[in-house]
Amino acid sequence: GKTLAEWLSEARRWEADDASADLSARLRAAVAVAEALQEFHEVGVVYDNLSPSNIVLDVFEGSCVATLIDLSEATIFYQKNEEFARKVGETDLRRLGSILLQLFRGYNGEDNDEDKYEPTGDEEAPNSRSIHDERK
């Protein structure tokens, strides 16, 4: 397999060749990364180190499988409590958002570094109530 960082640099060439195939490949990669992260969360592990260089993508018969490598910062929670939920939101989900942005930002042909979101850890993670309140 290749790291997502390597995969993304190669994906830039696909855009010129076949935009629809490029979108399909990016969608498969996005789903694979989200599923791999979900598997960690289901067993009470916060990965806490999600980045393109720590994700290996393998393609098998047209489907994509993601493997998360470098578990040096992973945290095991024996109970899925509020602290677990907070840690997932502050680290893994924010970094997943950054990964998805990197996966799709170049799809329309634009390569704008201003779009890259890198969480600093200082931001307060939104909760469902604050998001709901903003819609009013």
Image (spheres, rainbow, N blue to C red):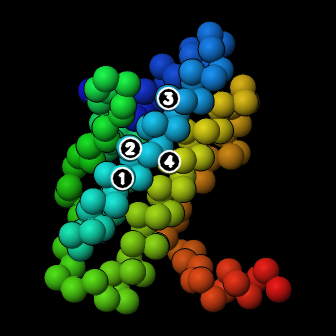
51, above or below 91, in the image: above
Pointer 4 or 3: first along the chain: 3
Q: Position of residue 110 (x, y in %)?
A: 73, 30
* Mark 3: amino acid: Ala
Q: Position of residue 134 (x, y in %)?
A: 77, 82
Pointer 2 or 3: first along the chain: 3
In the picture, residue 87 is in which quadrant? bottom left
Q: CA distance from mark 1 to mark 4?
A: 13 Å
* Mark 4: amino acid: Ile
The residue pinned by badge 1 equals: 35
Q: CA distance from mark 1 to mark 3?
A: 15 Å
The residue pinned by badge 2 equals: 32
Few, some or many residues within 10 Å of mark 2 (<14, 14–19, 20+): some
Q: Nearer the viewer, mark 2 or mark 4?
A: 2
Asked if labels 4 and 2 touch by Cβ distance under 8 angstroms, the answer is no
Toward the top, the furthest residue is 17
Q: Secondary structure at mark 1?
A: helix
The label shown at residue 10 is none
